[in-house]
Image (cartoon, helix red, strand yellow):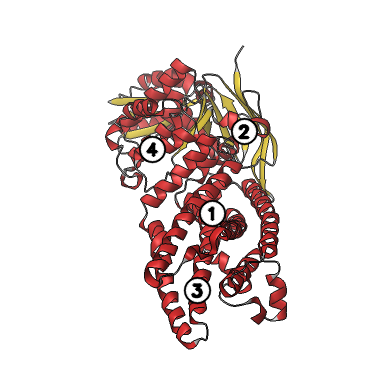
Amino acid sequence: MLNKVLEVKNLTKQFGDFTAVDRVSFSLNEGEILGLLGPNGAGKTTTIYMLLDVMEPTSGQISYFGKTFKKARSEILKRVNFSSAYISLPWLFTVDQVLSIYADLYEIPNKKKRIDKLLSEFEINHLREKEVNSLSAGERARLLLTKAFLNYPEIILLDEPTASLDPEIAVKIREFLKKEQKEYKVSMLFTSHNMGEVEEMCDRVIILNHGKIIAEDTPENLANQITVSQMEILIKDYKKAEEVFEDQKIKYKRDGSMFYISVESKKISNFLTMLTNNKINFQDISINKPDLEDFFLKVSKGGLRPGGRL
Amino acid sequence: MSLQRIYAMNKRYFYTLIRSYDRLSDMFYWPVMDILVWGITGLYFASLSQNPKETTTVLLTGLIFWVITWRSQYEITVNLLTELWDRNLVNIFSSPLKLSEWITSVIIYGGTKMSISLVFSAATAFILYKYAFFQFGAWLVPIFINLGITGWVIGFIVASIIIRYGLKAQTLAWTGAYIIVPFSAIYYPLSILPDWAQKISLLIPSSYVFEAMRQHIFLNTISADKIFVSFALNIFYLILSILLFTFAFKKSKQKGLGRLIG
Protein backbone atom coordinates (compact mmCIF):
# COMPACT_ATOMS: atom_id res chain seq x y z
CA MET A 1 0.00 0.00 0.00
CA LEU A 2 1.30 3.44 -0.93
CA ASN A 3 2.20 5.69 1.96
CA LYS A 4 0.53 9.07 1.48
CA VAL A 5 2.73 11.84 2.88
CA LEU A 6 0.56 14.73 1.74
CA GLU A 7 -3.20 14.79 1.36
CA VAL A 8 -5.16 17.74 0.05
CA LYS A 9 -8.93 17.65 0.24
CA ASN A 10 -11.30 20.15 -1.37
CA LEU A 11 -8.74 22.93 -1.12
CA THR A 12 -10.35 26.23 -2.06
CA LYS A 13 -9.07 29.79 -2.17
CA GLN A 14 -11.31 32.71 -2.94
CA PHE A 15 -10.36 36.36 -3.28
CA GLY A 16 -13.71 38.12 -3.09
CA ASP A 17 -15.77 36.78 -5.98
CA PHE A 18 -12.76 35.27 -7.73
CA THR A 19 -12.02 31.61 -7.05
CA ALA A 20 -8.29 31.02 -7.55
CA VAL A 21 -8.32 27.39 -6.39
CA ASP A 22 -11.56 25.46 -6.59
CA ARG A 23 -12.07 22.28 -4.49
CA VAL A 24 -8.72 20.77 -5.42
CA SER A 25 -8.03 17.30 -4.01
CA PHE A 26 -4.91 15.20 -4.53
CA SER A 27 -2.34 13.22 -2.63
CA LEU A 28 1.40 12.75 -2.82
CA ASN A 29 2.91 9.35 -2.10
CA GLU A 30 6.20 8.66 -0.39
CA GLY A 31 9.02 8.84 -2.94
CA GLU A 32 6.75 10.13 -5.70
CA ILE A 33 7.39 13.09 -7.98
CA LEU A 34 4.09 14.76 -8.77
CA GLY A 35 3.94 17.40 -11.47
CA LEU A 36 1.66 20.37 -10.92
CA LEU A 37 1.06 21.98 -14.29
CA GLY A 38 -1.18 24.63 -15.68
CA PRO A 39 -1.11 27.83 -17.70
CA ASN A 40 -0.29 31.12 -15.99
CA GLY A 41 -3.05 32.03 -13.53
CA ALA A 42 -4.23 28.43 -13.23
CA GLY A 43 -3.75 28.43 -9.44
CA LYS A 44 -0.40 26.63 -9.10
CA THR A 45 1.40 29.27 -7.03
CA THR A 46 -1.68 29.86 -4.87
CA THR A 47 -1.80 26.12 -4.18
CA ILE A 48 1.91 26.02 -3.32
CA TYR A 49 1.59 29.01 -0.98
CA MET A 50 -1.25 27.27 0.85
CA LEU A 51 0.84 24.10 1.07
CA LEU A 52 3.63 26.19 2.67
CA ASP A 53 1.25 27.80 5.16
CA VAL A 54 1.96 31.31 3.94
CA MET A 55 -1.59 31.62 2.68
CA GLU A 56 -4.74 30.63 4.53
CA PRO A 57 -7.15 28.46 2.50
CA THR A 58 -10.76 29.61 2.35
CA SER A 59 -11.80 26.02 2.94
CA GLY A 60 -10.51 22.48 2.58
CA GLN A 61 -7.84 20.51 4.34
CA ILE A 62 -4.11 20.00 3.99
CA SER A 63 -2.44 17.24 5.97
CA TYR A 64 1.21 16.22 5.93
CA PHE A 65 2.13 12.85 7.45
CA GLY A 66 -1.45 12.71 8.77
CA LYS A 67 -1.07 16.00 10.65
CA THR A 68 -2.45 19.47 10.00
CA PHE A 69 -0.75 22.87 10.31
CA LYS A 70 -3.18 23.78 13.05
CA LYS A 71 -1.87 21.05 15.31
CA ALA A 72 1.73 20.53 14.21
CA ARG A 73 2.94 23.42 12.04
CA SER A 74 6.60 23.55 13.12
CA GLU A 75 6.87 19.76 13.21
CA ILE A 76 5.57 19.52 9.63
CA LEU A 77 7.68 22.34 8.24
CA LYS A 78 10.87 20.82 9.70
CA ARG A 79 10.27 17.92 7.30
CA VAL A 80 9.23 20.01 4.29
CA ASN A 81 11.06 22.61 2.23
CA PHE A 82 10.69 24.48 -1.02
CA SER A 83 12.49 26.30 -3.76
CA SER A 84 10.99 28.78 -6.15
CA ALA A 85 12.46 30.73 -9.02
CA TYR A 86 10.32 33.66 -7.85
CA ILE A 87 11.60 33.95 -4.30
CA SER A 88 14.83 35.63 -3.30
CA LEU A 89 17.25 35.42 -0.39
CA PRO A 90 18.87 38.24 1.64
CA TRP A 91 20.83 39.85 -1.14
CA LEU A 92 23.60 41.47 0.91
CA PHE A 93 24.58 38.21 2.62
CA THR A 94 27.24 35.79 1.51
CA VAL A 95 26.21 32.31 0.45
CA ASP A 96 27.70 30.92 3.67
CA GLN A 97 25.78 33.37 5.85
CA VAL A 98 22.46 32.59 4.15
CA LEU A 99 22.90 28.85 4.54
CA SER A 100 24.08 29.13 8.13
CA ILE A 101 20.91 31.07 9.06
CA TYR A 102 18.60 28.59 7.36
CA ALA A 103 20.47 25.63 8.87
CA ASP A 104 19.72 27.10 12.30
CA LEU A 105 16.09 27.88 11.41
CA TYR A 106 15.61 24.21 10.48
CA GLU A 107 17.74 23.10 13.47
CA ILE A 108 20.06 20.96 11.31
CA PRO A 109 22.55 18.82 13.22
CA ASN A 110 26.16 18.98 11.87
CA LYS A 111 25.16 21.93 9.72
CA LYS A 112 28.68 22.59 8.39
CA LYS A 113 28.97 19.06 7.00
CA ARG A 114 25.53 19.29 5.40
CA ILE A 115 26.23 22.69 3.85
CA ASP A 116 29.59 21.47 2.48
CA LYS A 117 27.97 18.40 0.93
CA LEU A 118 25.16 20.31 -0.76
CA LEU A 119 27.40 23.11 -2.04
CA SER A 120 29.54 20.42 -3.68
CA GLU A 121 26.50 18.62 -5.10
CA PHE A 122 25.25 21.83 -6.70
CA GLU A 123 28.77 22.89 -7.74
CA ILE A 124 28.71 26.25 -5.99
CA ASN A 125 31.35 25.55 -3.37
CA HIS A 126 33.55 28.27 -4.82
CA LEU A 127 30.82 30.88 -4.24
CA ARG A 128 30.60 30.60 -0.44
CA GLU A 129 32.07 34.06 0.21
CA LYS A 130 30.17 35.74 -2.62
CA GLU A 131 27.22 38.02 -1.90
CA VAL A 132 23.84 36.80 -3.12
CA ASN A 133 23.40 39.93 -5.25
CA SER A 134 26.57 39.12 -7.20
CA LEU A 135 25.37 35.65 -8.23
CA SER A 136 24.04 34.90 -11.70
CA ALA A 137 20.43 33.73 -12.04
CA GLY A 138 21.62 30.15 -12.43
CA GLU A 139 23.88 30.34 -9.37
CA ARG A 140 21.05 31.84 -7.34
CA ALA A 141 18.71 29.03 -8.42
CA ARG A 142 21.29 26.50 -7.20
CA LEU A 143 21.64 28.38 -3.91
CA LEU A 144 17.86 28.21 -3.46
CA LEU A 145 17.99 24.47 -4.10
CA THR A 146 20.82 24.12 -1.57
CA LYS A 147 18.66 25.91 0.99
CA ALA A 148 15.73 23.70 0.06
CA PHE A 149 17.65 20.47 0.71
CA LEU A 150 19.36 21.63 3.92
CA ASN A 151 16.90 19.95 6.28
CA TYR A 152 16.89 16.50 4.62
CA PRO A 153 13.30 17.21 3.51
CA GLU A 154 10.91 14.31 3.17
CA ILE A 155 8.71 16.47 0.97
CA ILE A 156 9.97 19.24 -1.25
CA LEU A 157 7.94 21.72 -3.26
CA LEU A 158 9.81 22.85 -6.35
CA ASP A 159 8.39 25.78 -8.29
CA GLU A 160 10.24 25.81 -11.62
CA PRO A 161 13.55 24.75 -10.05
CA THR A 162 15.50 24.62 -13.30
CA ALA A 163 14.21 27.88 -14.80
CA SER A 164 17.21 30.09 -15.63
CA LEU A 165 19.69 27.19 -15.47
CA ASP A 166 21.83 26.32 -18.46
CA PRO A 167 21.04 22.88 -19.97
CA GLU A 168 24.15 21.17 -18.58
CA ILE A 169 23.42 22.27 -14.99
CA ALA A 170 19.70 21.53 -15.43
CA VAL A 171 20.58 17.93 -16.31
CA LYS A 172 22.73 17.66 -13.17
CA ILE A 173 19.94 19.09 -11.03
CA ARG A 174 17.46 16.60 -12.45
CA GLU A 175 19.91 13.78 -11.77
CA PHE A 176 20.31 15.03 -8.20
CA LEU A 177 16.54 15.17 -7.69
CA LYS A 178 16.13 11.66 -9.10
CA LYS A 179 18.87 10.39 -6.80
CA GLU A 180 17.20 11.99 -3.75
CA GLN A 181 13.93 10.36 -4.78
CA LYS A 182 15.52 6.94 -5.26
CA GLU A 183 17.90 6.85 -2.29
CA TYR A 184 15.95 8.77 0.36
CA LYS A 185 12.38 8.41 -0.93
CA VAL A 186 11.98 12.17 -1.03
CA SER A 187 8.54 13.13 -2.34
CA MET A 188 8.36 16.12 -4.64
CA LEU A 189 5.70 18.44 -5.96
CA PHE A 190 7.15 19.82 -9.14
CA THR A 191 6.06 22.69 -11.36
CA SER A 192 7.76 23.51 -14.62
CA HIS A 193 6.97 24.95 -18.01
CA ASN A 194 9.47 22.56 -19.58
CA MET A 195 7.24 19.66 -20.60
CA GLY A 196 10.17 17.47 -21.57
CA GLU A 197 11.48 17.89 -18.04
CA VAL A 198 8.09 17.07 -16.55
CA GLU A 199 7.84 13.91 -18.66
CA GLU A 200 11.31 12.89 -17.55
CA MET A 201 10.87 13.68 -13.86
CA CYS A 202 7.29 13.10 -12.87
CA ASP A 203 5.63 9.84 -11.97
CA ARG A 204 2.26 11.50 -12.13
CA VAL A 205 0.93 14.85 -13.32
CA ILE A 206 -1.95 17.06 -12.24
CA ILE A 207 -3.09 19.78 -14.60
CA LEU A 208 -4.85 22.81 -13.20
CA ASN A 209 -6.86 25.29 -15.19
CA HIS A 210 -9.06 28.05 -13.81
CA GLY A 211 -8.31 26.72 -10.32
CA LYS A 212 -9.64 23.22 -10.98
CA ILE A 213 -7.94 19.92 -11.64
CA ILE A 214 -8.76 19.07 -15.23
CA ALA A 215 -6.51 16.07 -15.68
CA GLU A 216 -4.55 13.70 -13.49
CA ASP A 217 -2.54 10.74 -14.76
CA THR A 218 0.95 9.62 -15.73
CA PRO A 219 2.63 11.82 -18.36
CA GLU A 220 2.41 8.93 -20.88
CA ASN A 221 -1.30 8.39 -20.39
CA LEU A 222 -2.01 12.10 -20.72
CA ALA A 223 0.02 12.29 -23.92
CA ASN A 224 -1.87 9.26 -25.24
CA GLN A 225 -5.10 11.20 -24.99
CA ILE A 226 -3.90 13.12 -28.03
CA THR A 227 -4.49 10.78 -30.99
CA VAL A 228 -3.07 12.92 -33.78
CA SER A 229 0.60 12.92 -34.85
CA GLN A 230 2.27 15.74 -36.72
CA MET A 231 4.15 14.80 -39.90
CA GLU A 232 6.71 16.85 -41.81
CA ILE A 233 7.35 15.50 -45.31
CA LEU A 234 9.75 16.88 -47.90
CA ILE A 235 8.37 16.23 -51.40
CA LYS A 236 10.16 17.79 -54.37
CA ASP A 237 7.23 17.12 -56.74
CA TYR A 238 4.93 19.16 -54.55
CA LYS A 239 2.43 19.96 -57.33
CA LYS A 240 1.62 16.29 -57.78
CA ALA A 241 1.45 15.81 -54.01
CA GLU A 242 -0.99 18.72 -53.69
CA GLU A 243 -3.26 17.19 -56.34
CA VAL A 244 -3.31 13.87 -54.52
CA PHE A 245 -3.89 15.42 -51.07
CA GLU A 246 -6.76 17.53 -52.41
CA ASP A 247 -8.20 14.53 -54.20
CA GLN A 248 -7.98 12.50 -50.98
CA LYS A 249 -9.34 15.47 -48.93
CA ILE A 250 -6.23 15.52 -46.74
CA LYS A 251 -5.65 18.83 -44.96
CA TYR A 252 -2.10 20.14 -45.16
CA LYS A 253 0.10 23.21 -44.94
CA ARG A 254 2.96 23.73 -47.32
CA ASP A 255 6.16 25.79 -47.11
CA GLY A 256 8.06 25.31 -50.38
CA SER A 257 8.49 21.57 -50.74
CA MET A 258 7.82 20.89 -47.06
CA PHE A 259 4.34 19.62 -46.14
CA TYR A 260 2.92 19.72 -42.62
CA ILE A 261 0.13 17.23 -42.11
CA SER A 262 -1.82 16.06 -39.05
CA VAL A 263 -2.55 12.33 -39.18
CA GLU A 264 -4.25 10.08 -36.66
CA SER A 265 -1.45 8.04 -35.07
CA LYS A 266 -3.06 4.69 -35.89
CA LYS A 267 -3.54 5.68 -39.56
CA ILE A 268 0.08 6.65 -40.27
CA SER A 269 0.83 3.36 -42.07
CA ASN A 270 -2.29 3.81 -44.27
CA PHE A 271 -1.12 7.31 -45.13
CA LEU A 272 2.36 6.12 -46.14
CA THR A 273 0.84 3.31 -48.25
CA MET A 274 -1.34 5.89 -49.97
CA LEU A 275 1.76 7.95 -50.87
CA THR A 276 3.46 4.85 -52.36
CA ASN A 277 0.33 3.84 -54.31
CA ASN A 278 0.16 7.33 -55.82
CA LYS A 279 3.89 7.18 -56.70
CA ILE A 280 4.74 10.18 -54.53
CA ASN A 281 8.38 10.04 -53.54
CA PHE A 282 9.41 11.89 -50.39
CA GLN A 283 12.98 12.93 -49.70
CA ASP A 284 12.63 13.29 -45.95
CA ILE A 285 10.01 12.55 -43.34
CA SER A 286 9.64 13.12 -39.62
CA ILE A 287 6.76 11.95 -37.47
CA ASN A 288 6.22 13.74 -34.18
CA LYS A 289 4.26 11.52 -31.84
CA PRO A 290 1.98 13.39 -29.41
CA ASP A 291 3.58 14.19 -26.09
CA LEU A 292 2.68 15.94 -22.85
CA GLU A 293 3.29 19.32 -24.43
CA ASP A 294 0.63 18.63 -27.07
CA PHE A 295 -1.76 17.64 -24.32
CA PHE A 296 -0.87 20.71 -22.27
CA LEU A 297 -1.32 23.06 -25.22
CA LYS A 298 -4.66 21.52 -26.03
CA VAL A 299 -5.74 21.90 -22.40
CA SER A 300 -4.48 25.47 -22.18
CA LYS A 301 -6.57 26.41 -25.19
CA GLY A 302 -9.63 25.10 -23.38
CA GLY A 303 -9.89 21.78 -25.18
CA LEU A 304 -10.57 19.99 -21.92
CA ARG A 305 -12.98 20.87 -19.19
CA PRO A 306 -13.00 19.47 -15.69
CA GLY A 307 -14.11 15.87 -15.72
CA GLY A 308 -14.15 15.78 -19.51
CA ARG A 309 -12.09 14.24 -22.27
CA LEU A 310 -10.44 15.77 -25.27
CA MET B 1 9.71 28.01 21.48
CA SER B 2 13.03 27.05 19.92
CA LEU B 3 16.09 28.94 21.13
CA GLN B 4 18.00 27.90 18.02
CA ARG B 5 15.41 29.48 15.72
CA ILE B 6 15.41 32.66 17.84
CA TYR B 7 19.21 32.64 17.59
CA ALA B 8 18.95 32.16 13.81
CA MET B 9 16.75 35.24 13.42
CA ASN B 10 19.04 37.31 15.66
CA LYS B 11 21.95 36.21 13.50
CA ARG B 12 19.97 37.11 10.39
CA TYR B 13 19.42 40.70 11.61
CA PHE B 14 22.95 41.02 12.96
CA TYR B 15 24.37 40.12 9.53
CA THR B 16 22.09 42.77 8.02
CA LEU B 17 23.59 45.32 10.42
CA ILE B 18 27.22 44.53 9.68
CA ARG B 19 26.68 44.34 5.94
CA SER B 20 24.62 47.52 5.62
CA TYR B 21 25.99 51.04 5.99
CA ASP B 22 22.40 52.31 6.33
CA ARG B 23 21.91 50.34 9.52
CA LEU B 24 25.26 51.34 10.97
CA SER B 25 24.53 55.00 10.32
CA ASP B 26 21.07 54.60 11.90
CA MET B 27 22.75 53.25 14.97
CA PHE B 28 25.60 55.74 15.37
CA TYR B 29 25.51 58.66 12.94
CA TRP B 30 22.02 60.04 13.62
CA PRO B 31 22.23 59.88 17.43
CA VAL B 32 25.53 61.80 17.29
CA MET B 33 24.06 64.42 14.96
CA ASP B 34 21.00 64.83 17.17
CA ILE B 35 23.09 65.23 20.29
CA LEU B 36 25.41 67.68 18.57
CA VAL B 37 22.62 69.91 17.26
CA TRP B 38 20.38 69.73 20.33
CA GLY B 39 23.29 70.05 22.69
CA ILE B 40 24.40 73.29 21.06
CA THR B 41 20.78 74.48 20.96
CA GLY B 42 20.55 73.60 24.66
CA LEU B 43 23.68 75.63 25.42
CA TYR B 44 22.20 78.61 23.62
CA PHE B 45 18.88 78.36 25.49
CA ALA B 46 20.80 77.85 28.72
CA SER B 47 22.57 81.17 28.18
CA LEU B 48 19.13 82.86 28.12
CA SER B 49 17.73 80.91 31.05
CA GLN B 50 17.71 81.38 34.81
CA ASN B 51 18.52 77.68 35.23
CA PRO B 52 21.24 77.14 32.61
CA LYS B 53 22.45 73.75 33.85
CA GLU B 54 18.93 72.27 34.12
CA THR B 55 17.89 73.59 30.70
CA THR B 56 20.73 71.78 28.94
CA THR B 57 20.14 68.66 31.01
CA VAL B 58 16.42 68.58 30.19
CA LEU B 59 17.15 68.83 26.48
CA LEU B 60 19.93 66.23 26.43
CA THR B 61 18.14 63.79 28.72
CA GLY B 62 14.92 64.12 26.73
CA LEU B 63 16.86 63.48 23.57
CA ILE B 64 18.73 60.44 24.87
CA PHE B 65 15.63 58.97 26.51
CA TRP B 66 13.69 59.45 23.29
CA VAL B 67 16.38 57.43 21.49
CA ILE B 68 15.27 54.45 23.62
CA THR B 69 11.65 54.64 22.46
CA TRP B 70 12.43 55.49 18.89
CA ARG B 71 15.09 52.78 18.45
CA SER B 72 12.85 50.15 20.05
CA GLN B 73 10.03 50.96 17.64
CA TYR B 74 12.32 51.26 14.65
CA GLU B 75 14.02 47.90 15.16
CA ILE B 76 10.75 45.97 15.15
CA THR B 77 9.35 47.62 12.05
CA VAL B 78 12.55 47.86 10.02
CA ASN B 79 13.37 44.20 10.59
CA LEU B 80 9.96 43.28 9.24
CA LEU B 81 10.56 45.61 6.29
CA THR B 82 13.93 43.93 5.71
CA GLU B 83 12.12 40.67 4.97
CA LEU B 84 9.96 42.49 2.43
CA TRP B 85 12.88 44.33 0.82
CA ASP B 86 14.89 41.10 0.60
CA ARG B 87 11.83 39.20 -0.71
CA ASN B 88 12.56 36.73 2.06
CA LEU B 89 9.25 36.76 3.93
CA VAL B 90 7.95 33.54 2.38
CA ASN B 91 11.26 31.77 3.11
CA ILE B 92 11.20 32.51 6.81
CA PHE B 93 7.50 31.96 7.41
CA SER B 94 7.45 28.68 5.46
CA SER B 95 10.20 27.44 7.78
CA PRO B 96 9.41 25.98 11.23
CA LEU B 97 9.77 29.51 12.70
CA LYS B 98 6.73 30.47 14.79
CA LEU B 99 5.36 34.00 14.85
CA SER B 100 6.00 34.11 18.61
CA GLU B 101 9.67 33.23 17.93
CA TRP B 102 9.97 36.03 15.40
CA ILE B 103 8.42 38.47 17.90
CA THR B 104 10.84 37.31 20.61
CA SER B 105 13.76 37.60 18.18
CA VAL B 106 13.06 41.20 17.21
CA ILE B 107 12.51 42.17 20.86
CA ILE B 108 15.85 40.64 21.91
CA TYR B 109 17.73 41.97 18.91
CA GLY B 110 16.11 45.41 19.07
CA GLY B 111 16.70 45.63 22.84
CA THR B 112 20.39 44.81 22.41
CA LYS B 113 20.89 47.25 19.58
CA MET B 114 18.99 49.96 21.40
CA SER B 115 21.20 49.45 24.49
CA ILE B 116 24.30 49.93 22.36
CA SER B 117 22.82 53.07 20.79
CA LEU B 118 21.90 54.38 24.22
CA VAL B 119 25.36 53.85 25.72
CA PHE B 120 26.92 55.40 22.63
CA SER B 121 24.60 58.43 22.82
CA ALA B 122 25.23 58.89 26.55
CA ALA B 123 28.99 58.64 26.00
CA THR B 124 28.83 61.18 23.17
CA ALA B 125 26.84 63.58 25.35
CA PHE B 126 29.37 63.16 28.16
CA ILE B 127 32.35 63.79 25.88
CA LEU B 128 30.80 66.82 24.19
CA TYR B 129 28.94 68.45 27.09
CA LYS B 130 30.10 66.70 30.26
CA TYR B 131 26.55 65.44 30.52
CA ALA B 132 26.21 62.90 33.39
CA PHE B 133 23.71 60.36 32.14
CA PHE B 134 24.09 58.15 35.21
CA GLN B 135 22.81 60.89 37.54
CA PHE B 136 19.48 59.02 37.52
CA GLY B 137 21.07 56.11 39.35
CA ALA B 138 18.96 52.98 39.78
CA TRP B 139 15.94 54.82 38.32
CA LEU B 140 17.54 54.33 34.93
CA VAL B 141 16.44 50.69 34.93
CA PRO B 142 12.65 51.24 35.16
CA ILE B 143 12.95 54.32 32.93
CA PHE B 144 14.84 52.29 30.37
CA ILE B 145 12.31 49.43 30.53
CA ASN B 146 9.29 51.73 30.29
CA LEU B 147 10.55 53.72 27.32
CA GLY B 148 11.67 50.53 25.58
CA ILE B 149 8.24 48.94 26.00
CA THR B 150 6.54 52.08 24.68
CA GLY B 151 8.74 51.74 21.58
CA TRP B 152 7.77 48.08 21.18
CA VAL B 153 4.08 48.96 21.47
CA ILE B 154 4.33 51.49 18.64
CA GLY B 155 6.59 49.06 16.75
CA PHE B 156 4.00 46.29 16.81
CA ILE B 157 1.18 48.68 15.86
CA VAL B 158 3.20 49.92 12.87
CA ALA B 159 4.27 46.34 12.02
CA SER B 160 0.57 45.36 12.01
CA ILE B 161 -0.11 48.01 9.38
CA ILE B 162 2.94 47.00 7.31
CA ILE B 163 2.14 43.26 7.37
CA ARG B 164 -1.38 44.12 6.25
CA TYR B 165 -0.64 46.78 3.60
CA GLY B 166 2.95 46.04 2.62
CA LEU B 167 5.58 48.45 1.38
CA LYS B 168 3.12 51.25 0.66
CA ALA B 169 2.96 51.74 4.44
CA GLN B 170 6.73 51.57 4.94
CA THR B 171 7.17 55.26 5.74
CA LEU B 172 5.53 54.55 9.12
CA ALA B 173 8.72 52.73 10.14
CA TRP B 174 10.46 56.10 10.36
CA THR B 175 7.54 58.33 11.27
CA GLY B 176 5.28 56.11 13.41
CA ALA B 177 6.87 56.83 16.77
CA TYR B 178 6.63 60.60 16.28
CA ILE B 179 2.85 60.50 16.67
CA ILE B 180 3.33 60.34 20.45
CA VAL B 181 6.09 62.96 20.61
CA PRO B 182 3.83 66.01 21.21
CA PHE B 183 1.90 64.15 23.92
CA SER B 184 4.98 62.65 25.57
CA ALA B 185 6.19 66.12 26.63
CA ILE B 186 9.79 65.18 26.05
CA TYR B 187 11.32 68.68 26.20
CA TYR B 188 8.58 70.68 27.97
CA PRO B 189 6.34 70.16 31.00
CA LEU B 190 2.97 68.54 30.48
CA SER B 191 1.27 71.60 32.00
CA ILE B 192 1.99 73.79 28.97
CA LEU B 193 -0.08 71.54 26.71
CA PRO B 194 -3.72 72.53 26.09
CA ASP B 195 -6.27 70.69 28.23
CA TRP B 196 -7.40 68.30 25.49
CA ALA B 197 -3.78 67.34 24.77
CA GLN B 198 -3.07 66.80 28.46
CA LYS B 199 -5.97 64.34 28.57
CA ILE B 200 -4.43 62.38 25.70
CA SER B 201 -1.03 62.53 27.43
CA LEU B 202 -2.50 60.74 30.41
CA LEU B 203 -2.94 57.71 28.13
CA ILE B 204 0.66 57.84 26.82
CA PRO B 205 3.07 55.86 29.04
CA SER B 206 6.15 57.86 28.03
CA SER B 207 4.61 61.16 29.26
CA TYR B 208 4.85 59.90 32.87
CA VAL B 209 8.52 59.00 32.39
CA PHE B 210 9.45 62.39 30.97
CA GLU B 211 7.57 64.15 33.78
CA ALA B 212 9.50 62.02 36.27
CA MET B 213 12.72 62.88 34.45
CA ARG B 214 12.15 66.62 34.88
CA GLN B 215 11.11 66.11 38.48
CA HIS B 216 14.48 64.45 39.10
CA ILE B 217 16.44 67.15 37.28
CA PHE B 218 14.78 70.06 39.09
CA LEU B 219 13.89 68.56 42.48
CA ASN B 220 16.31 65.63 42.68
CA THR B 221 13.46 63.25 43.44
CA ILE B 222 11.30 60.88 41.37
CA SER B 223 7.67 59.99 41.93
CA ALA B 224 7.50 56.19 41.93
CA ASP B 225 3.76 56.49 41.17
CA LYS B 226 4.52 57.98 37.77
CA ILE B 227 6.90 55.17 36.88
CA PHE B 228 4.40 52.57 38.06
CA VAL B 229 1.47 54.06 36.07
CA SER B 230 3.69 54.17 33.01
CA PHE B 231 4.64 50.51 33.51
CA ALA B 232 1.02 49.39 33.99
CA LEU B 233 -0.10 51.24 30.85
CA ASN B 234 2.86 49.83 28.94
CA ILE B 235 2.12 46.23 29.84
CA PHE B 236 -1.55 46.68 28.93
CA TYR B 237 -0.68 48.27 25.57
CA LEU B 238 2.08 45.74 24.85
CA ILE B 239 -0.34 42.84 25.21
CA LEU B 240 -2.87 44.63 23.00
CA SER B 241 -0.25 45.53 20.37
CA ILE B 242 1.08 41.96 20.14
CA LEU B 243 -2.48 40.66 19.85
CA LEU B 244 -3.10 43.24 17.12
CA PHE B 245 0.04 42.16 15.24
CA THR B 246 -0.92 38.49 15.54
CA PHE B 247 -4.39 39.31 14.22
CA ALA B 248 -2.97 41.42 11.35
CA PHE B 249 -0.55 38.61 10.47
CA LYS B 250 -3.44 36.14 10.27
CA LYS B 251 -5.48 38.56 8.15
CA SER B 252 -2.47 39.06 5.88
CA LYS B 253 -2.09 35.30 5.49
CA GLN B 254 -5.64 35.19 4.19
CA LYS B 255 -4.46 37.24 1.22
CA GLY B 256 -1.10 35.45 1.18
CA LEU B 257 2.28 36.64 2.43
CA GLY B 258 3.65 36.13 -1.08
CA ARG B 259 1.83 39.25 -2.31
CA LEU B 260 3.93 41.43 0.01
CA ILE B 261 7.15 40.57 -1.82
CA GLY B 262 5.78 41.19 -5.31
Horizontally, is B246 left or right of A42 in the view? Answer: right
Binning the other alpha carbons within 10 Å of mark 2 as few (below 14), some (14 to 19) or many (20 upward) gives some
Residue occupied by mark 2: A73
**C-beta proximity under 8 Å, tags 3 and 4:** no
Nearer to us: label 1 or label 2: 1
For marks 3 and 1, the one nearer the N-term is 3
Instruction: Please name whichever residue, A173 or A109, is drawn nearer the observer in this view of the structure.
Output: A109
- For the residues labelled 4 and 1, the Cα–Cα distance comes to 30 Å
Instruction: Please name whichever residue, A12 or B177, is drawn nearer the observer in this view of the structure.
Output: B177
Please tell me if label 4 and label 1 are on a single chain: no
Q: Amino acid at mark 3?
A: Thr
**Any mark on residue B174, and which?**
none
Binning the other alpha carbons within 10 Å of mark 1 as few (below 14), some (14 to 19) or many (20 upward) gives many
- For the residues labelled 3 and 4, the Cα–Cα distance comes to 56 Å
- For the residues labelled 1 and 2, the Cα–Cα distance comes to 24 Å
Nearer to us: label 3 or label 2: 3
Residue A2, relative to residue B126: is it above or below?
above
Q: Chain of mark 1?
A: B
Nearer to us: label 3 or label 1: 3
**C-beta proximity under 8 Å, tags 4 and 1:** no
Helix, strand or loop at label 4? It is: helix
- For the residues labelled 3 and 2, the Cα–Cα distance comes to 52 Å
Residue occupied by mark 3: B57
Residue drawn where x is 54% and y is 54% of the image: B76
Q: Chain of mark 4?
A: A
